[in-house]
Amino acid sequence: MSTQASFAGTKIKIAIQLIIGLYIIFLGLTDRNANGLSAIGSIIAGSSFFLFAYINIRKVSSASSNLNNYNQNNDGIYHHYLEDGQKKFEIKIDDNQKTIYLADGNNAKTYSYNDIREWSYRVNTQTAIARMTGGVSAGLENLATASQLERNAWDNNGFFITVNDLQNPIWHIKFWGEGRVNRDNKFWTSVHKQCETWMLVFDKVINNK
């Protein structure tokens, strides 16, 4: 599945989630036999779908911002950039100045090659598929579980750079893959490939290999 096809699929899912959310709220507010608690329950259930739609909107935004430049212009610049909401994750290596700029969502700083101690990555998927079974309540619980597993995988995976810095010794750089998070292996396979490439980049510029 291409990145553009993945975007299209996610956008369709967003539209469906918004429609379902509106429909549930509409039913709860217009049902003459429903009491106040039922109406409130419908609003809460419908709002859950709005939340899932918002999460998917964030995913589309992150996916479209994931950029990698492996010295394509032969100018000594290697660059990775990803936006996740208000946070940015970035590696910018200037092989001419022998410097590495890092940003991990909360911090940003430039280091010399001599400051880099080691680099590694972790790609360990946590897969869950939410299904609307057992009624709306059970379906929402399954969706919430899947969403939490996605968040755990997103928080724990990525590229890690250890530097000589007492204030911030470990930098966690994130990558976005192709496909859907935790719905198939394409996403994490793509992330794994990007991390492997950056392992080679660091080995090349730091160790002159």
Image: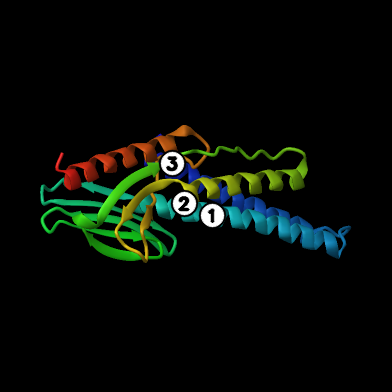
Work out whether 1 lies above or below 111.
above
Tell me the element at label 1: helix
At x 41%, y 62%, the residue is 87
- The quadrant of the picture occupied by the N terminus is top left
Quadrant of the snapshot with the C terminus? top left
Residue depicted at 14% across the width and 53% down the height: 95
- Is residue 2 in view from this perspective? no
**x and y percent of residue 110 in the render?**
25, 63
Q: Mark 3 points at which residue?
A: 6
Image coordinates for residue 150, horizontal then vertical, percent: 54, 46
Task: Please tell me which residue lies in front, 195 or 87.
Answer: 195
At label 3, the amino acid type is Ser
Residue with the mark numbered 2: 59
Considering depth in this image, is 92 or 64 the residue closer to the camera?
92
User: Number of labelled discs?
Assistant: 3
Crowding at dot 2, Cα within 10 Å, few <14 / some 14-19 / many 20+, comes out as many
Q: Quadrant of residue 39?
A: bottom right
Give the x, y percent position of residue 114: 20, 56
Which residue has dot 1 on it? 55
Label 2 with label 3: CB-CB less than 8 Å: no
Q: To which quarter of the image does residue 98 belong? A: bottom left
Residue 28, numbered circle: none
User: From what the image shows, is residue 200 above or below residue 68?
Assistant: above
**Chosen colour scheme:** rainbow
Left or right of residue 178: residue 204: left
Side of 157 relative to 92 (left or right) = right
Q: Is mark 2 on a helix, strand or loop?
A: helix
